Amino acid sequence: MLFLYYWFRLRNALLELILISMLAGLAFFFIIFPESTNIIAKKLDVGRGADLLFYISILFFLFISLKIFARLRRIEQTLTELIRQQAKSEVIFFDGSKKNES
């Protein structure tokens, strides 16, 4: 699922905010009702509630890692484009004249 997210590059900030809010709400729910983690874990055949929380946290950190990676890629692409534009504007020909901006 996380790789599909990155593949389609969902850049909808509202969707991401909703997903993170849901995960935070789930964390608060598990803090308030810790016995519910064991019940849910048994229904999912995970074993213990602590294991379920561990697996959920791994998925959460993978999601955050992919978000950071995607943002870093966008920053790199933006920086590359800016450097290309600056290099094009500073072209100097062999006769010492600069490129005329039209």
Image: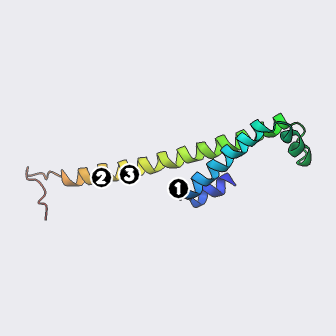
Measured as percent of width and height from the top left, residue 81 is found at 34, 53
Point out which mark residue 84 bears.
Answer: 2
Residue to which mark 3 is pinned:
78
Measured as percent of width and height from the top left, residue 7 is found at 60, 58
Kind of residue sitting beneath label 2: Arg
Q: Nearer the viewer, mark 1 or mark 2?
A: 1
Q: CA distance from mark 1 to mark 2?
A: 29 Å
Q: Nearer the viewer, mark 3 or mark 1?
A: 1
N-terminal label among 1 and 2: 1
N-terminal label among 3 and 1: 1
Looking at the image, which residue sits at the far top?
Answer: 50
Point out which mark residue 36 bears.
Answer: none
Q: Is residue 98 left or right of residue 71?
A: left
The residue lying toward the viewer, choosing from 11 and 27, is 27
Kind of residue sitting beneath label 3: Thr
Residue to which mark 1 is pinned:
13
Q: Taking 8 as reference, is 36 above or below it? A: above
Q: CA distance from mark 3 to mark 2?
A: 10 Å
Which quadrant of the structure image shows residue 18? bottom right
Q: Mark 1: which secondary structure? A: helix
For the point 31% across and 51% down, the residue is 82
Looking at the image, which residue sits at the far front?
Answer: 32
